[in-house]
Amino acid sequence: MTSAKRQSALVVDDDPVTRIITRGLLNYFGFEVSTLNDGIEVVNMYEAGKGHFDLIITDMEMPVMNGIEATKKLRSLGVGCKIIGVSSCDDETSRRHFMEAGLDHLFYKPLNVTKLQSCLENN
Amino acid sequence: MHRRLASMRKSLLDQGFLDEQFIQLEELQDDSNPNFVEEIAASYYRDSARQMLNIDQALDKYPLDFAKLDNLMHQFRGSSSSIGAKKVKNESTQFQEHCRTGNAEGCRRTYRQLKKEYATLKKKLEAYFQLARQAGPLETASRPK
């Protein structure tokens, strides 16, 4: 009996606690999960042709390249997978810019299990 | 033993040390990942110790760089809210308010309280996880398809 191939997800966040939690959440939903610490790393990965994920979850504020710039860059590289942003920032302008960068969804931190599940089920 | 654990959990919630986020994290635990929440808590205490060192150093400077303090505390608050550390998160929010109004004494006072709440929660979680390990895992709930 063959098992269905698991979908792959990438978590991009400079906070190690958030990376562990988000990885755990995505494992729970059946994803194979990788993690990176900064927007620049995910952009470098895709520019090198090594990025092949079904889902990317990215933080907004990161030290070298933030989530807004990383998302814009990924979309300009033709990355078509679902990209979900997460942020604890309340500033509506920043959140709007983040969405406009090319996100499919934007959630407040901490990630809510039910909301994420609903988002992942509605493709 | 599971009843004691449930009672301890309820007490932590009722007293405001933890919030619903912690419960959501516990629901992700299963046989393949039985110590998930303890692993998260360990990572939190490791990383937040580093963050607090940075905050300590920033508070030693004169004059205070409120923008920097606000940014440091923003990161710390994010980690704290991720594990459901409610009182710690609330003190972090208060600290950031003081940063925004340039209230140095408010920052220091709130930070002292934050450290107390942080240490108290650490002790309570250590006791909780010790009991959880003794109790062993509950029956696994079915994963979503």
Image (cartoon, coloured by chain):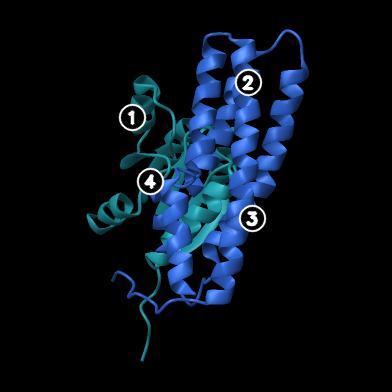
Chain colours: A cyan, B blue
Local crowd at mark 2 within 10 Å, few (<14), some, or many (≥20)?
few
**Label 2 or label 3, whichever comes before in sequence order:** 3
The span from disc 3 to disc 1 (Cα, nearest Å) is 36 Å
Q: Is residue B129 left or right of residue A108?
A: right
**Label 1 or label 4, whichever comes before in sequence order:** 4
Residue B117, position as x, y percentages in the image:
59, 38
The chain identifier of the residue carrying mark 1 reads A
Residue wearing tag 2:
B109
The span from disc 1 to disc 2 (Cα, nearest Å) is 40 Å
Residue wearing tag 1:
A100
Query: Residue at the location (39% across, 74% down)?
Result: A5
The chain identifier of the residue carrying mark 4 reads A
Residue wearing tag 3:
B42
Helix, strand or loop status at disc 1: helix
Observer-side mark, 3 or 1, equals 3
Residue wearing tag 4:
A83
